[in-house]
Every structure is written in structure tokens, then in C-alpha cells.
Amino acid sequence: MNWDERYNEPGYSYGTDPNDFLVSVAETITPGGRILCLAEGEGRNAVYLASLGYDVIGVDGSEVGLRKAQALAAVRGVTITTIHADLGTFEIGTEQWDGIIACYCHVPLAIRIPLHNSAVRGLKQGGVFMLEAFSKEQLAYNTGGPQSLDMLMSLADVKRELAGLELRHAVKLEREVREGSRHTGLASVIQIVGIKPVQTA
């Protein structure tokens, strides 16, 4: 997938409204906290989180998408930081983030495993990791997402990759996804909300 070409198309490929699962859980993150949005694309989720008062950094491999993210932020009257980077080499850091968001962050398995491991390390104690992504069963639905099993997820695999988090919500389910022209219709998704435990003396 050439994401610059995708995001050069008119409009916003996945709409300008935030992911509705994110909306349902966003305020579990420390108010005013620092949030990293992985594979943020055209900015819909980062802009929403900024509107709630969070300090938001969106990272993506597409400069075109990130320019549209900044344009959306300007229209909505909020400020976000964007970083153009390859998720295979991006440094998340250690205990840097109050929240890390991965909405439809579909990358090859060889990148995803270390990325998820790094996300666990990157959360502050008490920090929240939120994920929604297509499951491997999504191939049968034809309503969006990668056409490669390597880039789709199983709940068991994701749980292993996020070892070290307390999973408050970890499910595979069918739901209607209505996000722009690219995610539309009944889909098979995985949802995760994980908390990094607070260490006690």
C-alpha cells in the first residue's frame, strides 16, 4: 500500500470523526496526559483527543496523511504534534506516555511484535493502551482492511504481544464499522484496553 497515494485522494479516506471505540474509552486516560497515536494517518483520532485536552503526538509513515491531520487540527481549533516516521524504526521510549492508541495500525508481523512490545515499555505506570484492529477473519467480510493474513491479528497473538499489561477489555467481535469510504459495513475486529500496572514498594 502506498499511503501517500491513498491520502492524496480527495477528502478523508477514513472520515474526520474519531473511531467510536476510542471515544468510548478515551477518558480512562489521565486527564491532560501525553498520548501517542500510532499509524495516525489523516488525524481524526489525534484531533479528537486533543479536543479533550490531551497532549497528542501522531506518528505515521505518510507525510501526505500528516499534512491532512494538521489541516484538520487547524479547522477544529486544536494543536497536535505529528512525526513522520517508519513504525519499524520509531523509538517509543520508556515510560513516556499516559496513553498509546493503535486504531487499525496494520503492519507486518515482523514489525508488529516489537512495536507492541515497545508500546508496553513506553507506557507510564497506570498508562492505557487502546487497540482496535481487524481480525484474521476479516478477510471473509470484504468491508475494509489488509488483504494479507500477516497484517491481520488474532486475539491470542495480541495478548501475548502485550504481556505486561492488565487487560481490562480484550475481545474479538463482529460490529458495524462506518469510517469514511474505506471501512464500511459489518467487520470482525479485535478490541483491547490494557493498563500498565503501578508498581508498589
Image (spheres, rainbow, N blue to C red):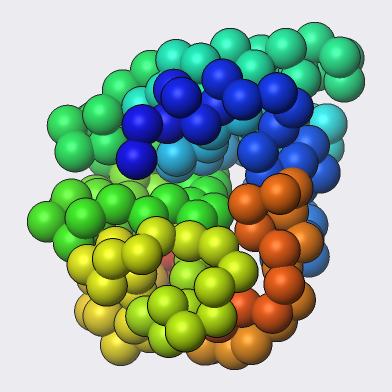
Q: Is residue 112 left or right of residue 54?
A: left
> Up-down: is 119 above or below 89?
below
Which quadrant is the C terminus positioned in? bottom left
Residue 13 or residue 123, whichever sits in front? 13
Q: Is residue 115 left or right of residue 153?
A: left
Residue 196 or residue 117, whichever sits in front? 117
> Up-down: is 29 above or below 8?
below
> For residue 60, which quarter of the picture?
top left
- Residue 173 in the image: x percent, y percent? 59, 89
> Up-down: is 189 above or below 89?
below
> For residue 11, which quarter of the picture?
top right
- Identify the residue at the far right of this view: 76
For the point 54% across and 54% down, the residue is 103
> For residue 155, which quarter of the picture?
bottom left
Asked if one can make out residue 170 in the rendered structure from this viewpoint, the answer is: no
For the point 51% across and 31% down, the residue is 6
Residue 47 or residue 25, whichever sits in front? 47
Which quadrant is the N terminus positioned in? top left
Count of numbered marks: 0
For the point 50% across and 56% down, the residue is 104
Q: Is residue 165 left or right of residue 12?
A: left
- Residue 111 in the image: x percent, y percent? 18, 50
- Residue 90 in the image: x percent, y percent? 24, 30
Q: Is residue 141 left or right of residue 90?
A: right
Residue 103 or residue 116, whichever sits in front? 103
- Residue 15 in the image: x percent, y percent? 75, 41
For the point 47% across and 84% down, the residue is 140
Asked if one can make out residue 101 in the rendered structure from this viewpoint, the answer is: yes
